[in-house]
Image (cartoon, helix red, strand yellow):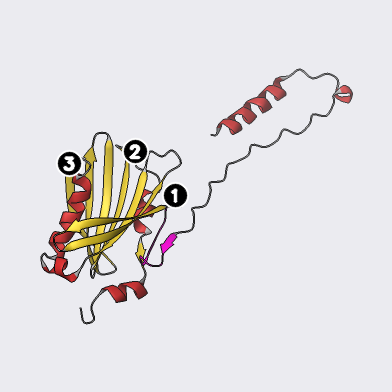
Amino acid sequence: MSRAALLLLLLTACAGARPQTRTEDAKPQPPVPSATVATPEPPRPPFRSAEGGFSVQLPSAPRVEQAEQATGTGDVLTHTFTSSDPTETTAYFVSYTDFPDEALAQTTPERLLESAARAGAESLGTEEVSVSPLTLAGFPGQEVHARAEGRELRGRVYLVGHRLYQQLLLHPVGAPPSDAERYFSSFTLDPQVTRTLVPPGT
């Protein structure tokens, strides 16, 4: 029972227990306002990146950044989208990186995915890391769970042709946000974009 409803119940009970004078002298009591039930705010519309070819449910408009990262075959550009909850204790990260064919030729999709999944976790100095395979729209991926210094990390990475997508959630240990499952399940790919990422016949 909400605090407002409990207060209304107590007020009603006290009013009923008051001694009454003669009926004809009793003044009509003003109606007690009913308790207002708070309506939860609807979720924001999904954030869509036309260039990135994905959509995802975020708690707030993301901060968009770009950064170059060095690889053995040259620099690559990573596009990052960062959002947080109202208390700023939980962070949501989505990114994508396009790798050159030369870089992909030096490894396998499985190794690249596991390396990417573990790299994000280990960069936080995590104490526990677990990785498991998954797929999205037929594309291979990995899910990672990690923990370090009072924080938990859950992430998913997908390889779509030459593009690596990463979706991460960082929150206090034992306190995942209520929208965690919606956040991960809402991540979808734009088929028109994925067709441009995958070589014909693969």
Tell which residue pokes out farthest to the bottom in this image: 201
Q: Earlier in the sequence, mark 1 or mark 2?
A: 1
Q: Tell me the element at label 2.
A: loop
Q: Earlier in the sequence, mark 2 or mark 3?
A: 3
42 relative to 201 in the view: left or right: right
Residue under pointer 1: 59
Question: What amino acid type is highlighted by mark number 1?
Answer: Pro
Q: Is residue 161 above or below residue 167?
A: below
Residue drawn at x 38%, y 67% as measured from the top left: 51
Residue drawn at x 60%, y 33% as measured from the top left: 5
Q: Based on the displayed image, in which of its 4 quarters is residue 101 positioned?
A: bottom left
Question: What amino acid type is highlighted by mark number 2?
Answer: Ala
Tell which residue pokes out farthest to the right in this image: 24
Q: For the residues marked 1 and 2, what is the alpha-carbon distance in whole angstroms?
A: 16 Å
Membership of 147 in magenta stretch: no
User: What's drawn in magenta, residue-wise?
Assistant: 47-58
Residue under pointer 2: 175
Q: Tell me the element at label 1.
A: loop
Q: Is residue 114 above or below residue 154?
A: below
Dots 2 and 3: beta carbons under 8 Å?
A: no
In what quadrant of the picture does the C terminus appear? bottom left
Residue under pointer 3: 128
Label 3 packing within 10 angstroms: few (<14), some (14-19), many (20+): few
Question: What amino acid type is highlighted by mark number 3?
Answer: Glu
Q: For the residues marked 2 and 3, what is the alpha-carbon distance in whole angstroms?
A: 17 Å
Label 2 packing within 10 angstroms: few (<14), some (14-19), many (20+): few
Dots 1 and 3: beta carbons under 8 Å?
A: no
Residue 64, x across and y down, in percent:
39, 54
Q: Which mark is residue 187?
A: none
Q: Earlier in the sequence, mark 1 or mark 3?
A: 1
